[in-house]
Amino acid sequence: MNGSRESILELKEICFSYKLRRGDKLRIFDHLSLNVYYAEFLGIAGPSGCGKSTLLRIMAGLLKPDYGEVYFRGKILKEPEPRISMVFQNPVLLPWYTVLKNVMLGLINEKNLSDKEKEERARSFLDMMGLLGFEDAYPSELSGGMRQRVAIARALVSHPDLLLMDEPFSNLDQLTAITLRREIETLWLNQSLPISSIVLVSHDIEELVEMCDRVVILTSRPSRIAGTVYVDLKRPRSRRSPEFYEYVDKIYTMLS
């Protein structure tokens, strides 16, 4: 279906193992290949422990595969790439920095911007995430949802081409998660986000069907791709529609 589309990121025959204390290896991926296309919201599902988070770290250049190559915009990815940003399950914020300074950390490699320009851009993304007025607050003074908004603002402030999201809503209360999902999706659909593509890892199948254009399902370790589901539903998507749950059931069937 995507034969004619251009890839922003490509994994080719990726093998990866974690080294255990005794010298043994825990195989995570066995010749896994995957494309992320331009202008795509891609979801990744799989059983617990199959390596979904590890896969994102390989995509980001934070982990190097034992075998195979990662290509970003047509070139081999050998190290962390500034044009790829990542949002983790637990927001990683410096507790001694204010909200504004935490977001400005995302611009640490932007040598062509003055301090004033960095601050202005950081404020604009705090505004986008509904955090104006909290610039001088510290992470300990924020709710979990607000801390995750700060982490997302920091990930976006550098204008990355690719955003990787590792279970970003799983530790939030239900209402906060619903609100933040809708805001991210709305910004994406309105092309308000300065990114080409998003990859979302989640154990919440309904979340993946609601947000993603395509969902890739991984097998248990050593992981390969069990199947792919293209979600052809009009946005915004309603979880109450029978068609929505047809996709949910299809993914659950592949997982089992």
Image (spheres, rainbow, N blue to C red):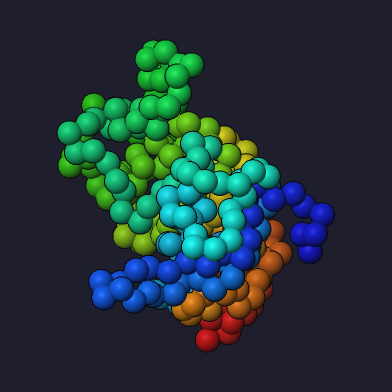
Q: Residue at x 48, y 44 (%)?
A: 79
* Vertical side of 5 occupied by 157: above or below: above
Q: Can residue 79 be seen in this view?
A: yes
Q: Residue at x 43, y 62 (%)?
A: 54
User: Which of the image's four quarters has the N terminus?
Assistant: bottom right
- Nearest to the observer: residue 98 or residue 187: 98
In the drawing, does residue 42 fall left or right of residue 80? right
- Nearest to the observer: residue 99 or residue 20: 20
* Vertical side of 226 occupied by 233: above or below: above
In the drawing, does residue 23 fall left or right of residue 63? left
In terms of image quadrants, where is residue 129? top left
In terms of image quadrants, where is residue 130? top left
* Vertical side of 127 occupied by 2: above or below: below
Residue 160 rendering spot, x and y as whole percentages: 53, 37
Q: Can residue 203 be seen in this view?
A: no
Residue 44 rendering spot, x and y as whole percentages: 54, 65
What is the count of numbered marks?
Answer: 0
Residue 132 rendering spot, x and y as whole percentages: 35, 29
Q: Which residue lies furthest to the right in this view?
A: 4
Q: Which residue is drawn at 42% across and 62% down?
A: 53
Q: Which residue is drawn at 27% across and 41% down?
A: 93
Q: Residue furthest front?
A: 23
